[in-house]
Amino acid sequence: MPIQLFLQHDDSFDPEDIAKLSAAFGAALGKLGLTDRRDPLTVEVAKLIIEFAKQGERDPERLCALAVQQLSK
């Protein structure tokens, strides 16, 4: 499931932001070893990345690190 599905009706992000969130999402899935996009954990990763982006973070590497860190707790 691509992160764009979660952003379809959310006008908080422009296309450049969405590209950054998508990059962070893909990187986080890779670091977590998630290959099945239907895994419920991928939904959690997407939600975390979107949440951190809404708080102002736009750097894909930082978004990835924050999501991975949060899920590692």
Image: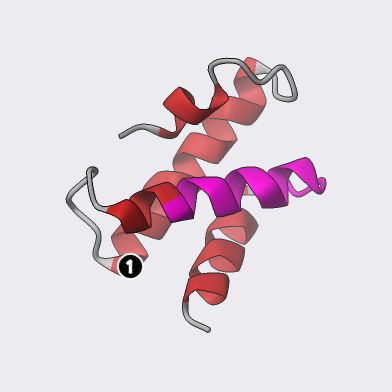
Question: Main SS of the magenta segment?
Answer: helix
Location of residue 67 (image quadrant): bottom right
The outermost residue toward the right is 56
Residue 35 in the image: state x and y as whole percent.
18, 53
Q: Which amino acid type is shown beneath numbered disc 1?
A: Leu
Q: Residue at x 68, y 48 (%)?
A: 51
The outermost residue toward the bottom is 73
Residue 31 in the image: state x and y as whole percent.
35, 66
Residue 28 in the image: state x and y as whole percent.
42, 58
Q: Secondary structure at mark 1?
A: helix
| Region rendered in magenta | 44-57
Say above or below: 69 vs 14: below
Location of residue 15 (image quadrant): top right
57 horizontally vs 7: left or right: right
Q: Is residue 17 magenta-colored?
A: no
| Quadrant of the snapshot with the N terminus | top left
> Dot 1, crowdedness within 10 Å: few (<14), some or many (≥20)?
some
The outermost residue toward the left is 36
Say above or below: 15 vs 32: above
How many badges with numbers are in the image? 1
35 horizontally vs 66: left or right: left
27 horizontally vs 54: left or right: left
Say above or below: 51 vs 69: above
The outermost residue toward the front is 40
| Residue assigned mark 1 | 32
Q: Is residue 52 magenta-colored?
A: yes
Q: Residue at x 40, y 47 (%)?
A: 43
Q: Residue at x 58, y 27 (%)?
A: 18
10 horizontally vs 41: left or right: right
Q: Nearer the viewer, residue 42 or 13?
A: 42
Color style of the picture: secondary structure
